Image (cartoon, rainbow, N blue to C red):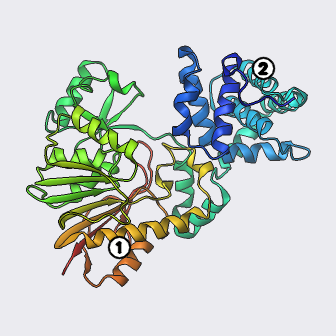
């Protein structure tokens, strides 16, 4: 009998709870939207393992699929059992969980989730994996680990770099802080961490960035409550450094939530007015919370819930930061559920939405003003190609080249890839309005 999804989750073992979370993502729910609720049922002592198993399985999802398919005499067509297999194989091949515990707990999860009749299949395949672990591990290592539509696109866009990208997307992203330089310098904060016995080192391309050498509970780090730092990816930290001097200027941070860029601008400059715009009211609340925690002067900040496709500014802006909605392929290390949630057909819709927002925001910019176009994608359709079309259609637009030794120069703009111990995949293009 198939167990109803509402059966008492409290009685399930940890592996069954992991499987339920993975099923929710397969059925189109983002990990962020279900994590808190699912995590609430997990006991405190098991939370770290729960987290590792959920994120690890999502990160290795397509590789685990490639390992599993040849082992089945006929397709199972049963997502609960397949997910149990992926979870079991992940534990055996990628973690230090003892093999006997990984197998018995995962087989028990299959039974608890109403798959008793197929639990023998799970048991047999996982036992085989322990006997042939080297061959299994080789398949896992060599699998591309990307959905086939995305692998095709990346090969087309970045043929020479495809192997490197495929490897990087299997890794976990580092925990990176941006020091609030209104309060403390980066070197001072590194000294504070050292005094506390916490290992960390400077980011290479962000002047305010620190990479943590161990994963820690953020709110327990020194200076968190007092607003000494924010958590922000190293490549995302470059945004504020690519802007002109914004002292006394009118600035729009379009698509601003949750507020990392808004805060960084206020840490570096004193604009006359800063509008943080987003259509997600719930996420916009975090902008206000972040500014408050960081003790930043927000009397000239307006937080507005509106759709950037249609919104009209009360006055023309000197500078617009447009972190455009995108496929988020570049941040897949941090959000491994993107592998399952994003579909091939989404890209064209996203590109069309970006174009609408770009065209509308361009109208809100003063002549002589700067628009910084950003995505956390590495797909050329959303980045270089989007800009080629924008410049072709806007005679009053001129690229201001980003002179830098990071990233790869494109026809327009610069592209950063996700890199081990460094930032995620980001694209930047700086545009000036000439008339």
- Give me the residue at 87% from left, 47% from top: 75
User: Picture quarter containing residue 163?
Assistant: bottom right
Residue 380 can be seen, yes or no: no
User: Taking 125 as reference, is 38 left or right?
Assistant: left
Q: Which residue is mark 2?
A: 104
Q: CA distance from mark 1 to mark 2?
A: 57 Å
Residue 212 in picture, x, y percent from top left: 35, 32
Residue 90 in picture, x, y percent from top left: 68, 34
Q: Nearer the viewer, mark 1 or mark 2?
A: 1
Residue 227 in picture, x, y percent from top left: 22, 31
Are the residues flagged by discs 1 and 2 in contact, CB closer than 8 Å?
A: no
- Give me the residue at 23% from left, 44% from top: 263
Residue 385 can be seen, yes or no: yes
Residue 231 in picture, x, y percent from top left: 33, 37
Q: Nearer the viewer, residue 299 or 335?
A: 299
Q: Earlier in the sequence, mark 1 or mark 2?
A: 2
Q: In what element is the residue under mark 2?
A: helix
Image quarter where the N terminus lies is: top right
Q: Is disc 2 surrounded by few (<14), some (14 to 19) or many (20+) residues within 10 Å?
A: some
User: Taking 413 as reference, is 22 left or right?
Assistant: right
- Give me the residue at 51% from left, 55% from top: 329
Q: Which mark is residue 265?
A: none
Q: Is disc 1 surrounded by few (<14), some (14 to 19) or many (20+) residues within 10 Å?
A: some
Query: Relative to 368, does residue 225 appear above or below in the rendering?
Result: above
Q: In what element is the residue under mark 1?
A: helix
Q: Nearer the viewer, residue 286 or 327?
A: 286
Looking at the image, the residue that sits furthest to the left is 248
Q: Which mark is residue 359?
A: 1
């Amino acid at each position: 009998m198939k167990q109803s999804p509402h059966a008492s989750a409290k009685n399930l073992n940890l592996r069954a709870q992991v499987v339920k979370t993975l099923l929710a993502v397969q059925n189109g729910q983002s990990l962020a939207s279900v994590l808190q609720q699912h995590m609430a049922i997990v006991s405190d002592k098991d939370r770290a393992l729960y987290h590792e198993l959920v994120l690890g399985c999502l990160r290795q999802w397509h590789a685990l699929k490639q390992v599993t398919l040849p082992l089945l005499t006929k397709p199972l067509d049963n997502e609960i059992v397949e997910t149990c297999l992926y979870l079991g194989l992940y534990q055996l091949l990628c973690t230090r969980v003892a093999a006997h515990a990984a197998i018995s707990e995962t087989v028990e999860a299959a039974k608890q989730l109403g798959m008793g009749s197929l639990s023998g299949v799970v048991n047999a395949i996982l036992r085989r994996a322990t006997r042939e672990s080297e061959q299994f591990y080789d398949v896992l290592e060599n699998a591309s680990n990307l959905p086939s539509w995305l692998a095709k696109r990346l090969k087309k866009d970045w043929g020479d770099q495809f192997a490197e990208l495929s490897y990087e997307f299997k890794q976990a992203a580092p925990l990176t802080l941006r020091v609030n330089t209104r309060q403390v310098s980066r070197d001072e904060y590194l000294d504070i961490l050292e005094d506390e016995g916490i290992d960390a080192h400077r980011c290479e391309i962000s002047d305010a960035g620190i990479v943590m050498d161990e994963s820690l509970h953020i709110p327990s780090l020194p200076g968190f409550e007092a607003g000494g730092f924010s958590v922000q990816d190293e490549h995302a930290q470059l945004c504020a450094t690519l802007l002109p001097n914004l002292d006394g200027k009118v600035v729009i941070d379009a698509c601003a939530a949750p507020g990392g860029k808004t805060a960084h601008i206020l840490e570096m400059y004193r604009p006359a007015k800063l509008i943080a715009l987003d259509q997600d009211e719930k996420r916009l609340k975090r902008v206000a919370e972040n500014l408050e925690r960081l003790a930043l002067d927000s009397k000239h900040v307006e937080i507005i819930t509106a759709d950037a496709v249609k919104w009209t500014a009360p006055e023309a802006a000197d500078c617009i930061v447009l972190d455009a909605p995108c496929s988020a392929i570049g941040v897949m290390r941090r959000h491994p559920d993107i592998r399952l949630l994003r579909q091939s057909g989404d890209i064209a819709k996203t590109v069309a939405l970006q174009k609408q927002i770009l065209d509308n925001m361009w109208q809100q910019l003063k002549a002589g003003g700067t628009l910084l176009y950003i995505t956390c994608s590495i797909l050329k359709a959303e980045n270089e190609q989007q800009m080629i079309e924008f410049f072709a259609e806007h005679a009053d637009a001129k690229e201001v080249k980003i002179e830098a030794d990071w990233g790869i120069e494109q026809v327009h703009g610069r592209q950063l890839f996700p890199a081990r111990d460094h930032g995620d995949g980001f694209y930047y293009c700086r545009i000036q309005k000439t008339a």
